[in-house]
Amino acid sequence: MSEQSVFQVALNTLNEAGRLGNINPGVMAILQAPKRIFHFRIPLKRDDGSLEVFQAYRVHYCDAVGPFRNGTRIRPKLSLDEVQALGIFMTIKHCVGGIPAGGAKGGIRADLGTLSLSEQERLIRAYIRNLHPKGPWADVPGADIGTGEQAMAWMLDEYEQVTGEHCPAAINDKPPVLGGTLGGEEATGRGVFIVLQAAAKDFGIDLAGAPVAVQGFGQVGSVVATLLHEIGCRVVAVSDVNGGIYDEAGLDIPELKSYLATKGTVRDFPGSKNITNEELLTAPVEVLVPAAVQNVINADNAAGIKARLIVEGANGPVTTEADTILTAQGTKIVPDVVANSGGAIVCHFERTQGLSDEYWDLERVNNSLYKRIMAAYTNSRNRAEEVGTASIRLGAWIEALKKIEQAMKLRGWV
């Protein structure tokens, strides 16, 4: 399936959940498109004096339950279609996670590999200026693919230079020394791990020695793989943008992380066999964690998936058609809006800390994350059972839509 259809994939899920959950038609009409879209072009003078212009976006999807929050993605093929899809995912994710926030997403179409560090800084600062930021009660940008603590530090500093006041709650995913939270960088991967353990128990999968594949060995996938390795899972396959590796006996994840830090890729890791990303998806494993990009499991390859359990570390890795095929063949799927909500949950904690000027220790962050994400998983699973569907994804979306429906009715929007 083409990447341009990722927003339609999200709408397909939205509309099916709305039908199954008997959601008010007015609510569904409002949610067919974002509340507002910002798209602008950023001129950047390069270090060599040349000029390049970059396309940028920010999507405010729905703020019925709270202010817009999260996500700034930078990658070469970023499209408005993708950003809109991510905006609706964040809307649902916040509601499922019990977070009083609306869904937003943004980004810049750029190849960071072609930009110097100073060029990246100027581009990111210009992005914040163009957003005319209004603060923690209106819109709080955070990190995503292509951005991290350093980018968020630049964003916060630019925001504070523009407004003339310190406001750590205005930007999420920043370093702790600037008012960020402990545990933030690991939060998404840790959340996936927590939910994976719960789902494996529910579906009768013994994780001790179980073969697991993780597609994507970045900030999310590497954390998931590390935690699974620590509890005795056989992580037999992992991959990055260059391809994957496989070892039936199980990969030594700490050694692999050291190798990656030196070589810049997981390929050719000693003792393993090089495989393609496609081969990783269809590897003979009990659990599959797609933690890279959207639409990697689709109608073309779904029938070849051998995993009994799929836990979505990425946003939208399974298309609508693939979801139907997999569910019909008995594969259990824990959806992105639950499984990878750890980052959004801890961002909520980060904003809370910034507004109160009281900062938590790591134990409190991780314990609070566990409680919040387990509630999201349990509520979604129970909602699916209540409406008579085998799809936890639809259960999660219905759970979220019920909250949005209630908020919109109380506000008088419908």
Image (spheres, grey):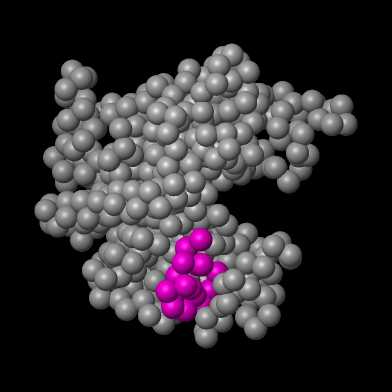
Residue occupying image coordinates x 25% and y 76%: 204
Res 170 seen here: yes
Q: Is residue 275 left or right of residue 332?
A: right
Horizontal relation, residue 41 to residue 281: left or right: right
Q: Position of residue 234 (x, y in %)?
A: 47, 79
Q: Is residue 358 above or below residue 240?
A: above
Residue at the right extreme, as displayed: 48
Can residue 1 be seen here? The reply is no
Q: Give coordinates of residue 138: x percent, y percent.
A: 41, 21
Residues 296 and 351: in front is 351
User: Looking at the rendering, which quadrant does residue 374 occupy?
Assistant: bottom left
Task: State which quadrant residue 57 falls in.
Answer: top right
Q: Where is residue 54 in the image (x, y as percent from the top left)?
A: 67, 30
- Front residue of 40/207: it is 207
Query: x and y percent of residue 364 in the render?
Result: 38, 49
The answer to whether 200 appears left or right of 343 in the picture is left
Q: For this rendering, which residue is in front, 153 or 234? A: 153
Q: Residue 67's quadrant in the figure? A: top left
Q: Does residue 257 lie above or below 144 as drawn?
A: below
Q: Which of 103 and 187 is in front in this view?
A: 187
| Residue in the image at 33% along x and 60% along y | 195
Q: Residue at x 21, y 40 (%)?
A: 18
109 part of magenta stretch: no
At horizontal 58% and vertical 28% (from top left) the residue drawn is 156
Span highlighted in magenta in the image: 223-238
Count the labels in the image: 0
The question of residue 229 being in magenta is answered with yes
Q: Quadrant of the C terminus?
A: top left
Considering only vertical position in the picture, is 62 above or below 337?
Answer: above
Check the image and name the residue furthest to the bottom: 249
